[in-house]
Amino acid sequence: MNGEAAQAAPVAKLYGEPLIELPADLYIPPDALEVILEAFEGPLDLLLYLIRKQNLDILDIPMAPLTRQYLEYVEMMRRKNLELAAEYLVMAAMLMAIKSRMLLPRPPAAEEEEVDPRAELVRRLLEYEQIKQAARRLDELPQVGREVVAIAVWVEKSVAERLPQVDPQDLAEAWRSLLARARLAAHHRVTREELSVREHMSRVLRRLQQQRVAEFRELFEPERGVAVLIVTLLALLELGREALIEITQAECFAPIYVKLAHAESH
Amino acid sequence: MLNPTDARRLIEAALLASAEPLSLADLKRLFDEEIGADTLRRLLGELREEWSGRAVELVNLASGWRFQTRPEFQPFVERLSPERPPRYSRAVMETLAIIAYRQPVTRGDIEDIRGVTVSAQIIQTLENRGWIDAVGHRDTPGRPALYATTKKFLDDLGLRSLEELPALEEIARTLQLEPVTPQEPPAEPAAQSGAPDGSGADSEPSAARAA
Amino acid sequence: MLNPTDARRLIEAALLASAEPLSLADLKRLFDEEIGADTLRRLLGELREEWSGRAVELVNLASGWRFQTRPEFQPFVERLSPERPPRYSRAVMETLAIIAYRQPVTRGDIEDIRGVTVSAQIIQTLENRGWIDAVGHRDTPGRPALYATTKKFLDDLGLRSLEELPALEEIARTLQLEPVTPQEPPAEPAAQSGAPDGSGADSEPSAARAA
C-alpha cells in the first residue's frame, strides 16, 4: 500500500499545481463508509473517487491496485448489506478483465495495432467526470424561482376570473419544494398505504359530522373487500390515537360506538 | 444604514417580485436595521410618486402594498395573452399538497410543515374551489378545524383515490435532501489544495446548500 | 402614433406583467400600427438602460425579454418568500447536464455515460419542470425517445442559447493537468475494437454528439 502511495507521488500534481501533501491514507474510516458509499452515483463515480483521492494519473491508471481497492469497496458494501446495484458488479468484472489483459504478453507482430486495454475505461471516466462538473456548473447558474424572481405584477381585470388548473404532478412539485425546505424526509414518510389510511380518516370524520354517533360496525363497508376493511380499521385506530374520535363500549360484547371527540360541546 | 435611494430600490424590487401585497411588517423584514413605519410610509409615498407617470402603479390595499397595471392597460394585456392559464401561487399549492398527503390536518399542522404562517385567504381559496373542507375539529385549545380534500378535488384532478397521487418516496429520491458534505470532504481535500481556479470551489455550493 | 416615451411605458408594463419572457412578435401585438423589429429592439435597449441601476433588470433570454430580480438580490428574495423550488439530486442534475450538452440523447445514452440506470422518475421530474422534452425517436429496436432541452430550460437559467452554457472544453481543462484533447480523437475508434464487453455501446453517445 505504502509503496503505491509513494509511486503516486511523482504524478501528484493536480489542476496544474503541485500537491502540498499526499492524503495520509488511502482508506476511508469504516464508520464513514456507509455515508460515503451511499453518496456515490455509481461505479464510475466510485472509481473517480478512488483515482482522485490517490492522485493517480487517470491517463496511466495502475490497474492492479485500483482493481483491488475497488473490489474491497464492493466487498464492504456487501458486508454492510447495502443495496448493491448490478452495475457495480459489471464494473468489477470489467476491471478484472482489463487487468488480466495487461498481464498478457503481447505478440510482437501485433504490437503496433495493440490498443491499451484501459483506453475505453479512461474515456468513460473522463466523460463522466466532465458531466459531473457540468452538472455542478448548471446547478450554480442563477435559476428563476430559486435565486431570481420573474417579475409579474398584478393585472387588474374586469373579466370573470378563470380558475387555475392543477394536475397531480403540480402537487408532486409542491411537495418537492416542501421537502427540500423542511427536511420532511425523516418524519413525513408517507407511503401509498398510509395515504389510503389518511383518506379513510377523512371519510370517517366527514361521516361523523353528519351523524354525530355511529356504531363501529356501520363504518365498515365489507362489500368493498378486505383491503378496505383493514384500511378503515387502521383509520379508526389512528383517529383514536390522535384523539380525534372517541370509541366507547358500555360493557363486554355491547355495541361499540364512535363519535367525534367532544362532539357535545358543539 | 442604507441611503433613501437604495432603500427605495430595495422596496421597489421586493414589491415587484412579490405575487401578493406586502404589509409594512413584511417590508420591515427586508432591512437589517430597525426601520420605523413612518420612514417606510414616506419611502412608499416617494416610490408611488416616482411611478405616477407609468402604466404600472403602486397601490395601497387592505393587506398591504402592491404594484399593478392601471385599468386602462387591460386591453393591451388581453392582446398579449388571450389564453395564458392562471396559476395558483406556490403557497396555495403547498397548502393543498399538505392537505392532500397528510389529511386530516389543522392550519397549525400546515404551518408546522411549511415553516410559515398560512393566511386565511389561502385556506379560503381552496374551500371556495370546493377542493377542501373542514371534516372536524381537533380537541385542543381553540378547537382548530381539521381539513381534508373532497371528492370534487379527486374529480377535478382526474383521480379515483388519493392513492393515485404521485408517490412521495419517489419524489424524495429526486431531491438533494441531505447535505452532501459527508461525501465531499474525503473527496475534495486533494482538489482544494491544488485548485488554482474556480473548480475547487465547485464543492462549496453543495456544502452551502446545507446551511 | 405613440411617442417613444409612451411606447416604452407600454412595453415596460407588458413585460412587468408577464412572468414568461415576451418575444418581439408578442410585443408587436401591443401596438395598433406596424412597428419594426429594429424600433422595438431600440426601445428595449433604452428600457434596459433605464433600469440599469436597480435591483430588477431587463434580460434577453431564449424566448424573449423579461424583467427579473438581479442574482445579487437573492438574500432578500429568501427573506420574503420561503417557497422556492428545491435543488435537485445529483442524479437529476447529471441527467440534465447530459441532455443539455449531448442532445438529443436517449435514456440509454444517459445510462451509458452515468454508468447507472436512470429512473423514469428522474426523466419525469425534468419533463414536468418543462426543461426537457422528447423531440423524436431513435431508429433502433424499441424506438427509444430522444430527449432535448427546451427554451424554458434556457429561460429559467438565464441563457439565450445553448452556446451560453458553461463551456465543456473549459470544464475539461480544469479536470486534469494532462492535455485531454490530443488523447481523445485516437482513443475513440480504438476504444471500440478494444472494448472487451458490452461497453462497446458506449460509443453511441459520442456518435450522437456529432449528429
Image: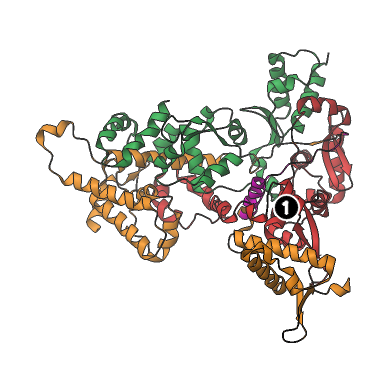
Chain colours: A orange, B red, C green
Based on the picture, tell me whether residue B69 belongs to the magenta stretch.
no
Image position of B138 (left or right of A117): right
A148 in relation to B171, above or below: above
Chain label for disc 1? B
Is B28 located above or below residue B137 in the figure? above
Residue A11 drawn at (x, y percent): 28, 45
The furthest residue to the bottom: A251
Viewer-proximal residue, B129 or C11?
B129
Q: Amino acid at mark 1?
A: Leu
Boundaries of the magenta span: A158-179
Where A171 falls versus B58 (above or below)? below
- Tell me what residue is drawn at x 88 percent, y 31 percent: B71
Farthest residue, direction left? A108
Q: Is residue C195 visible?
A: yes
Q: Taking the image as drawn, is residue C80 in sight?
A: no
- Which quadrant of the rendered structure holds the N terminus of chain A? bottom left
Q: Secondary structure at mark 1?
A: helix
- Would you say residue A162 sits in the magenta stretch? yes
Q: How many marks?
A: 1
* Residue C52 percent location from the top left of the image: 70, 30
Q: Looking at the rendering, in which quadrant would you find the C terminus of chain A?
A: bottom right
In the rendered image, residue C43, in percent from the top left (x then y), is placed at 73, 20
Q: Where, by quadrant of the figure, is residue B135 drawn?
A: bottom right
Who's the residue at 61% across and 27% down the image?
C62
Q: Choose between B101 and B2: the one closer to the eye.
A: B101
The residue closer to the viewer here, C112 or C16, is C112
Residue C39 rendering spot, x and y as whole percentages: 72, 15
